[in-house]
Structure formats: structure tokens, C-alpha cells
């Protein structure tokens, strides 16, 4: 099996889990029933024997030309296969979750006739567990596969056969015909799910996504200049909606685990969880596009997840708010392009990362400013978090990048502690809440002085990754965006210049230089981090370098795959996407930069509380 590039995959989703479909017509990744469940199709991290579902022209069809696109602003994928004898379109989608979860594949004949093949390899438990497959009694078109608590039912009018512990079929589709395949997941102890009408499911799915995306599309069309990057913004919003677990409002960072940050390397992590640090930018992205229901669901998930003792607040949780995310390695999977190890769970959930306190309090403050209905317990929770933060803000932590090389006094962590107290003060001043404002102001001033004294390296003329170091960190591009210093402060100007000099690779931004920095205790090698590159575009805009901002933004848009999807990182030399995919943080940053460049109400202004001059867009 030839490994496909990450950008060769498309996303399907039912707002509770997602599947990845390759350009070749193979579904190589699907976790059922939730985003963070065990994978039933795991070829992405192994080979076809670890689970996949292929529908494509048979070898007898000859040379095949492939093209694909989403149907308008939906997650309905249409892959067109053209051969000498004809053309077919495979229409793939997952209907919004009802009682059961379905993957529907419709093979439509467009021209002539095409010989097709289907190869279904179900492997539960991340590619290891072969199910017991039988015919469903009383349903000639249904094949049932059971493994422990799991049951999957395949329904199709095509005759299928079992070969070497897989299910195969060959069939021919002619112009005007449509051949359906429906794969349905349910619990093995419950009755077999009733069949669905594939055509009705297609209509319902198209209506769902079109109705959801419609208000955002109209909002962009009505804005001055909003149409310039409307397709990119809408596709990013649809992706974020697909990454949202509908029952709780939690948003996963990505649908995959262990797609490498460097091909062949060990920087492979499980991203099927919800990170608190995504909170504010996600919230603003939804609010600014008028999606208040999604913004409120995300805000409410945050508050439920962190509820309890402030000392026990984690930096990430599961989609339902579970806290135990134990990390272990899957020994039997070779990893994407032999990038080992494959990790399930994430040990970083137990780290101390002080920036999340600022993120939570900032997000709740922005929710108030954005007009979301107040949560009765929100202010009491913030008071408790701030009381705890008073005691720990001056401690070392593992930092925003989840360093595994020991705790340090990370500069950005301290800045976000400053943000926590600053936003609490603003909440009292703007919304009339009660709190010890005098003490908070004093602590805020102490933190500010501490960062400026210990986090700035005069020799480099730049803020640095942690106190006393000479290492740069791209997250410091957010200094004016969070309101810590104005953009025209000489220290920030020096920081931008240093990052441009030392962290740019082919014009894109590294988080930090792994060749020079052993803080994370991992082997060197990492791609350019896409969110950081969007942050540089934002910094350019705040500095009045509008042409530079637009040029960088256009280059970043060009990195999206043909369907508008982005991963976590980009490898400039190989010119390919790397890291988990699709990555929420990258799409959140894209939405933010697009709004910063085109909207009068700019996310970086909303967050920082600074206004922009009309002439040059710099913070004042």
C-alpha cells in the first residue's frame, strides 16, 4: 500500500466523529462512535490490513483521472473518476448523527460504464481486532460485523464476498445508475439498526450543512471586502463545526493521532481532545460570524470542564470533559510513513501550564463582551481561579508548547497570567461585577514588571521563550494581540525582527528552533507551525505593514489542500502538510487573520482592548 500524503485526504463528519477519505477513494481513518474512540479504519497509521474501505475503479478500467470537490459549503465529498470507458462520481458523506452513525457512499454513473471494486477491511482496536461477519437474518442486502461491544452493518444491493478476512465486491456502473453503500455503527447488544434511505440521507445532509453555513456566507457577502477570502473562511468554519462534539460543545484539536510533526520523527501526539488554550480565538471566530449557539456551547463546555478545585484544572479534557487521558504507545502500528511511536492519550494533560488560566478568564470576558447570556456560576469560578493563580503565577511551568524537558519560567505563561488579572479587572469595570480590584491591579503590575525585566533579552533585543534564555518563541507574536504591550513598543518591534531573522523557514514560522533548543527533550526536527505564521501576518498588520500581512496570508492560503483543509504544520523543503489533520488551531488562526485584514471589528482589537488607526492599522 502506497501511503498518501496528508493533503490527499478529505474530511467527512457527523458532528460526533470524523472519517478521512483519500484521493484514491479509500477511507483510511475512522474512530467509532466518538472522535476519541478506537479506530476501526486505521490504514492511515499502518496499511490496509489495519482497516480501510476502498471504492474505486477496478484495475481493468485502465488509466484513471481523479478530481474532487465538496458540494458547495457542505461536507459532502464528490470524487470523480474518469476512464477511457466512462466516468463515475463517488459521493461520500456522514449524515448528521441520529440514533446511529452512518457512512454513506453513492457511486453515480456519469458517462459510459466503469468497472468498480469495493474492499472493506474492518479492524477494531486500532487495526488488530477482526470482527465476526455474518449475514443479517431477514435482510439480504445486510452484512453484520461484530467485535465485543461494537457492531457495524454494511448494506448494499451489490453482491459481496468474504476473501482473506475482508469483504470484497466488483460491479459495473453505467450512466444514469447510482449504486449505494451504507455502513452503520451500533452497539452489539442492541437490535440491528434499521436501514436508511441513502437518497433522503443525502438531501438531509446537504440541507443541514447548507442551512448551517448560509448565515456565515451571507454575512461575508454583506461585508466590505469580506468576499475576498470568503471561501477559505467558510470552509474553516465548516471544519470547526465538524470538529465539534455536538452533545457537549467540545471541539477537538484534530481528528487524528500521531500524524508526525516531522516525517520519520517521534513528535507524534494524540490531538483528539479539547485544549483550553484554543478558547478565546475559537469563541471570537464563532461570535464574529454570528454563530452564537456554537460560541455559547463552547463557552459552557469550558466552564463545565474546569469546574471543581482550581488546583486540579487541566490544560485539556476529553470531548465530554473526562480528565483521564492516559498516554500509551501502540506497538503494532508502524506509524504514518514509519513515524514512531503511535500514541493514544496525551500525558500533557497532567502538566502545569499557567497560560490556560488567562485563556479561560479571557474567553469568558470576551463572551460577555460579545453578548452571550451570562452563566450564573462563571464569575464565582473565575474568582476561585484567580485566588489560586495569585499563589502560583510565579512558579515555573511546562509552557504553551507542553515541554517535556522540565519546568521553566516561560515568558508567555507569565503574560497570560497578566491577562487573567487584566480581564478580571475589565469585567468589574465594564460589567459591574464585585471583586478585589485593587489587589488585582497590584498583582497585574507586578507580573508586568516581572516579564519586562526577566523575559526580555537586551542582547537579542527580543522577548525570549523563558526567563534568562536566548531562545526565541513565535507565541510572543501575540504580545500586542492580548494587550500586554502596544505593537509599536520598541521591545515588540525587536521581537518581530528577531523572529523574522531566526525562525522563518521559506517565509513560514517555526514555533521555536528545535536545532538550537533542547527544552522539549525531543530529537530535533519540526515543520513550520501554521498558526504561528498567521500570527506573524497579524503582527505585520498591527505594525502597519499591511502589504506584508496580505502577502503572507495569501501564501498561507496556498498551503491548503484542494479542499481547503490545513494540518498543524508545513514542511517547506518537501512542500507538504505535516502534523495532525485537519487542525482546528490552524483554521481558527486563518479565520482570525482574515477578519483582522478585512473587518472593521478585528479580533485582535476585541481581545487586546486596543484600537487601530484607520491610516495604518497599528495598535495605539
Image (cartoon, rainbow, N blue to C red):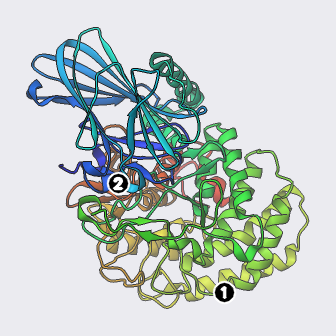
Number of marks present in the image shown: 2
User: Is residue 516 shown above or below 594?
Assistant: below
Locate residue 444, reporting x and y percent: 73, 77
x, y (%) of residue 383?
83, 69
Seen in the picture, residue 562 relative to 571 is either above or below; the reply is above
Name the residue rendered at 56%, 86% in the picture.
409
> Which residue occupies the foreground of this view, 467 or 498?
467
Task: Give the CA distance from mark 1 to mark 2.
Answer: 46 Å
Number of other residues with Cα within 10 Å of mark 2, as a class: few under 14, some 14 to 19, many 20 or more: many
Dot 1 surroundings within 10 Å: few (below 14), some, or many (20 or more)?
A: some
- Is residue 93 visible in the rendered image? The answer is no
Residue 127: numbered disc: 2
Query: Where's residue 616, x and y in %?
Result: 51, 52
State the residue at coordinates (11%, 31%).
59
SS at badge 1: loop
Establish if 474 lies above or below 20. below
Write down the residue under mark 1.
394
Mark 2 lies on a secondary structure that is: helix
User: Which mark is on residue 348?
Assistant: none
For the C terminus, the image quarter is: bottom right
Q: Is residue 457 left or right of residue 553?
A: right
Number of the front mark, 1 or 2: 2
Where in the figure is residue 279, as x and y percent of width and height? 62, 57
Amino acid at each position: 500500500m502506497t501511503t498518501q500524503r496528508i493533503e490527499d485526504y478529505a474530511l467527512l463528519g457527523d458532528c460526533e466523529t470524523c472519517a478521512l477519505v483519500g484521493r484514491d477513494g479509500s477511507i483510511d481513518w475512522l474512530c467509532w462512535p466518538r472522535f476519541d474512540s478506537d479506530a476501526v479504519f486505521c490504514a492511515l497509521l499502518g496499511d490496509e490490513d489495519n482497516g480501510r474501505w476502498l471504492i474505486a475503479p477496478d484495475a481493468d478500467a485502465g488509466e484513471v483521472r481523479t478530481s474532487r470537490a465538496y458540494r458547495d459549503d457542505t461536507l459532502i465529498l464528490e470524487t470523480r473518476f474518469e476512464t477511457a470507458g466512462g466516468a463515475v462520481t463517488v459521493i461520500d458523506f456522514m449524515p448528521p448523527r441520529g440514533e446511529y452513525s452512518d457512512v454513506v457512499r453513492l457511486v453515480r454513473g456519469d458517462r459510459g460504464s466503469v468497472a468498480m471494486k469495493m474492499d472493506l477491511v474492518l479492524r477494531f482496536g486500532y487495526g488488530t481486532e477482526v470482527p465476526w461477519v455474518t449475514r443479517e437474518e431477514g435482510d439480504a442486502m445486510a452484512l453484520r460485523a461484530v467485535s465485543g461491544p461494537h457492531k457495524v452493518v454494511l448494506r448494499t444491493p451489490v453482491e459481496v464476498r468474504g476473501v482473506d478476512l475482508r469483504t470484497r465486491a466488483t460491479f459495473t456502473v453505467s450512466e444514469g445508475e447510482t449504486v449505494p453503500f451504507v455502513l452503520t455503527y451500533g452497539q452489539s447488544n442492541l437490535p440491528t439498526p434499521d436501514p436508511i434511505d441513502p437518497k433522503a440521507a443525502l438531501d438531509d445532509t446537504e440541507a443541514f450543512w447548507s442551512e448551517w453555513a448560509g448565515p456565515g456566507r451571507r454575512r461575508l457577502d454583506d461585508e466590505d471586502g469580506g468576499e475576498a477570502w470568503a471561501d477559505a473562511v467558510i470552509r474553516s468554519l465548516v471544519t470547526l463545526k465538524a470538529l465539534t462534539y455536538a452533545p457537549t460543545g467540545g471541539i477537538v484539536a484534530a481528528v487524528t493521532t500521531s500524524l508526525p510533526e516531522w516525517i520519520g520523527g517521534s513528535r507524534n501526539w494524540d490531538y483528539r481532545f479539547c485544549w483550553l488554550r484554543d478558547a478565546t480565538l475559537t469563541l471570537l471566530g464563532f461570535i464574529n460570524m454570528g454563530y452564537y449557539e456554537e460560541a455559547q456551547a463552547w463557552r459552557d463546555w469550558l466552564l463545565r470542564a474546569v469546574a471543581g478545585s482550581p488546583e486540579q484544572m487541566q490544560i485539556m479534557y476529553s470531548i465530554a470533559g473526562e480528565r483521564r487521558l492516559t498516554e500509551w504507545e501502540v506497538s503494532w502500528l508502524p506509524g504514518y510513513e514509519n513515524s514512531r511511536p503511535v500514541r493514544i492519550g496525551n500525558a500533557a494533560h497532567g502538566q502545569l501550564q499557567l497560560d490556560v488560566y488567562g485563556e479561560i478568564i479571557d474567553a469568558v470576558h470576551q463572551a460577555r463582551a460579545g453578548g452571550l447570556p451570562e452563566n450564573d456560576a462563571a464569575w464565582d469560578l473565575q474568582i476561585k481561579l484567580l485566588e489560586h493563580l495569585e499563589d502560583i503565577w510565579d512558579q515555573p511551568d511546562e509552557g504553551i508548547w507542553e515541554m517535556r524537558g522540565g519546568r521553566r519560567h516561560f515568558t508567555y505563561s507569565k503574560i497570560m497570567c497578566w491577562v487573567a488579572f487584566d480581564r478580571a479587572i475589565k469585567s468589574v469595570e465594564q460589567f459591574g461585577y464585585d471583586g478585589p480590584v485593587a489587589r488585582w491591579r497590584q498583582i497585574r503590575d507586578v507580573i508586568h514588571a516581572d516579564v519586562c525585566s526577566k523575559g526580555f533579552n537586551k542582547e537579542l533585543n527580543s522577548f525570549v521563550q523563558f526567563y534568562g534564555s536566548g531562545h526565541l518563541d513565535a507565541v510572543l507574536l501575540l504580545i500586542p494581540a492580548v494587550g500586554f504591550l502596544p505593537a509599536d513598543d520598541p521591545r515588540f518591534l525587536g521581537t518581530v525582527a528577531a523572529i523574522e531573522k531566526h525562525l522563518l523557514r521559506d517565509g513560514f514560522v517555526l514555533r521555536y528552533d528545535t536545532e538550537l533548543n533542547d527544552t522539549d527533550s525531543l530529537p530535533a526536527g519540526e515543520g513550520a507551525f501554521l498558526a504561528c505564521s498567521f500570527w506573524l501576518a497579524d503582527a505585520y498588520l498591527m505594525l502597519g505593514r499591511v502589504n506584508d500581512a496580505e502577502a503572507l496570508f495569501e501564501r498561507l492560503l496556498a498551503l491548503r489542500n484542494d479542499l481547503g483543509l490545513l494540518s498543524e504544520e508545513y514542511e517547506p523543503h518537501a512542500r507538504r502538510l505535516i502534523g495532525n489533520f485537519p487542525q482546528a488551531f490552524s483554521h481558527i488562526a486563518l479565520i482570525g487573520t482574515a477578519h483582522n485584514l478585512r473587518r472593521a471589528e478585528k479580533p485582535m482589537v476585541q481581545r487586546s482592548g486596543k484600537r487601530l488607526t484607520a491610516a495604518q492599522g497599528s495598535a495605539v
